[in-house]
Amino acid sequence: MSTAIKQYKRVTVKSLVEMKANNEKISMLTAYDYTMAKIVDGAGIDVILVGDSASNVMAGHETTLPITLDQMIYHASSVIRGIDRSLVIVDLPFGTYQGNSKNALDSAIRIMKESGGHAVKLEGGSEISESISRILTAGIPVMGHLGLTPQSIYKFGTYTVRAKEEEEAQKLKEDAKLLQELGCFALVLEKVPAKLAQEVAESLSIPVIGIGAGGGVDGQVLVTHDMIGMTHEFSPRFLRRYLDLYSEMTKAFQQYISDVKSQDFPNEQEQY
Ligand code: KIV
C-alpha cells in the first residue's frame, strides 16, 4: 500500500512530530563534514546528526568521551554549510551538560550560536532533567537519548544491549515519559530490545528514532561511515551495509599507487 508522503522544503522539529502523526518513518544519518553533509542532504535525508561518534569515526578515539565542545562546533559548522533541507542536530559532548544546568545552557548556546545547528542531543534521563529544562528555556530544541548511552560506557562496561532486565526497562520507560513531559521534541533509543522500543514509541506522541531498536519505532539512525562500509571493524547485528567503500577505496588507492609508480599517471591529457 502506498501512502502520499508530504514534501518538506526544510525539515524542522515540528515536521518530525508531524511525520510521526502521519505514520511516515523518519530517516536520520550522521555527518561530520561539509562534503558528506552535502551528499546526505542532497539524497533527501530528513535529519543529520552531528554525533559525538565523530570522536571514534573522525578522530580514532576508542570512546566518545574525549571530543570537545570546540571540536563539535567545528564539525557542526562544516555540516551546516553543506545542507539545504535537513534538520541538523548536534550532540552535546561528555562533560558539557552533566551536573550543572548553567554549564549545559552555556554549551547549548555555544553550539547554536557558533555552528548554526538547529537542535542539540543529550544522553540520559532523570539525572539530567535540570539541564534539559534549562536548555529548553532558551528556546533550544532538545532531543533525548536513552538505552545504550556511549558517554556512560565506563559505567556499563560493555556496548551490549541495554534494558533487557525488567528494572532497567521500567526506568527507561519512565525516563522516556519524563523527556516528553520536559519538552524534548524527539528521542533516540539505542540498542534495546525491539519489543520495549516499540512499546515506548507507541506510548509517546514525540518521535522515537532507533538504532539497534527494531522496526517498531518512528525512524532509524545509523552512523554513515558504518552504513557505507568505510569502517569495517565494527559489525553489530543491527548494521545494514549499503556499500563496501573500504574495499572500493582500497582498490582505488592501490590502482593510483601502481599508476604513479609505473608512470602511467599522469598521461599526455592530464598535464598542461
Ligand atoms: O553519536 C552518534 O552517532 C549517536 C548515534 C549513534 C545515535 O549518538
Image (tube, rainbow, N blue to C red):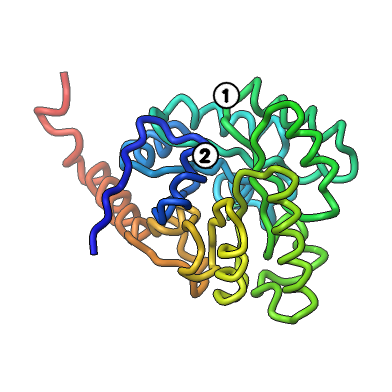
Q: On the image, which quarter does residue 7 sit in?
A: top left
Q: Secondary structure at mark 2?
A: loop
The numbered mark, 2 or 1, whose residue comes first in the sequence reads 2
For the residues marked 2 and 1, what is the alpha-carbon distance in whole angstroms? 14 Å
Seen in the picture, residue 20 relative to 77 is either above or below; the reply is: below
- The front one of 166 and 264 is 166
- In the displayed orientation, state which residue is furthest to the bottom: 165
Q: Which residue in the protein does label 2 denote?
A: 32
- The front one of 35 and 193 is 193
Callout 2, which amino acid? Tyr
Q: Which residue in the protein does label 1 denote?
A: 116
- Camera-near label (2 vs 1) is 1
Which residue is depicted at the point 41% across and 39% down?
Answer: 36
Seen in the picture, residue 198 relative to 179 is either above or below; the reply is: below
What quarter of the picture does the N terminus occupy?
bottom left
Seen in the picture, residue 193 relative to 28 is either above or below; the reply is: below
